[in-house]
Image (spheres, rainbow, N blue to C red):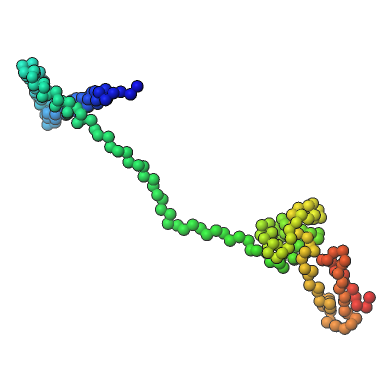
Amino acid sequence: MEPTAMQRGARTLTHGQRLLLRRLAARAAAWVRAGRRDDLDGLAAVLGCLLRAVLLLAGAYGAWWALRRWPAALWVLVPLWCWAAVRAIPKAEPEQPAEVPVEADDEPDPAPAPGPPMPTLTDLSDTVSRVGTPHAHLAVIAEALDTTTDQVREALTQHGIPVEPVRMRGRGSSTGVKGDHFPAPAAPSATVVAAGQPNNNNANNAFRITDDPTNPYRHHVHHASH
């Protein structure tokens, strides 16, 4: 049950009277202690304190005697006392919102590290011809090119090479590319000269290269005389 306005007023007045009495008592005690003489010793040093305490007691007795003699003065003193008690209550200050410290960020954000370069068609073709059986998985191509599978997939898409499930010898089936989707590598020169031998380019030293019908990346070298 919430208190009524009269109950709240009575509690406020009681609280104010307590604060007012504490304040008056603290001031009276401080005034009495101020009568001590530090330059003297013994009873002479505290004689001023005793005298001030007697004056306070005499003043309290005089106020009590005056009220008994003229009780009508309470009609003025009681409202003044209540007003002083209410004034003794400190006013509630509005709560200030907590300030959130803002850290100054003077340093610019570090630039992101550059990603691996996009593989070219030549890189893909050479890698597939080197690691393919004849097909190659994307993960194997990416490892050989020191890049990521996403980069390999994107490069294959850009060059119009389909990505599909393929079977790679020794690795099973996974997403990859078939070897026959790449153009055949350029054939080596028809004339082969061994190291340290004279360059005798006649008809007897000519070779003929043919493709392997079962593997487009395998070639057969035939001597022209055969």
**In x, y percent, where is residue 86?**
20, 29
**In x, y percent, where is residue 62?**
7, 20
Q: How many numbered discs?
A: 0
User: As drawn, which residue projects farthest toward the top?
Assistant: 68
Give the residue at x 72% y 68%: 122
212 horizontally vs 33: left or right: right
User: Residue 168 occupies which quadrant of the picture?
Assistant: bottom right
- Who is closer to the viewer here, 34 or 167? 167
- Who is closer to the viewer here, 22 or 177? 177
**In x, y percent, where is residue 220?**
87, 70
112 horizontally vs 34: left or right: right
Evaluate whether residue 170 shows in this view: yes
Quarter that holds the C terminus? bottom right
Give the residue at x 78% y 72%: 186
- Who is closer to the viewer here, 181 or 204? 181
- Who is closer to the viewer here, 111 or 152? 152
Quarter that holds the N terminus? top left
**In x, y percent, where is residue 93?**
28, 37
113 horizontally vs 213: left or right: left
Give the residue at x 6% y 18%: 70
User: As drawn, which residue projects farthest toward the right?
Assistant: 226
Give the residue at x 77% y 66%: 182
Evaluate whether residue 50 shows in this view: no
User: As drawn, which residue projects farthest toward the left?
Assistant: 69
User: Residue 192 occupies which quadrant of the picture?
Assistant: bottom right
User: Residue 205 occupies which quadrant of the picture?
Assistant: bottom right
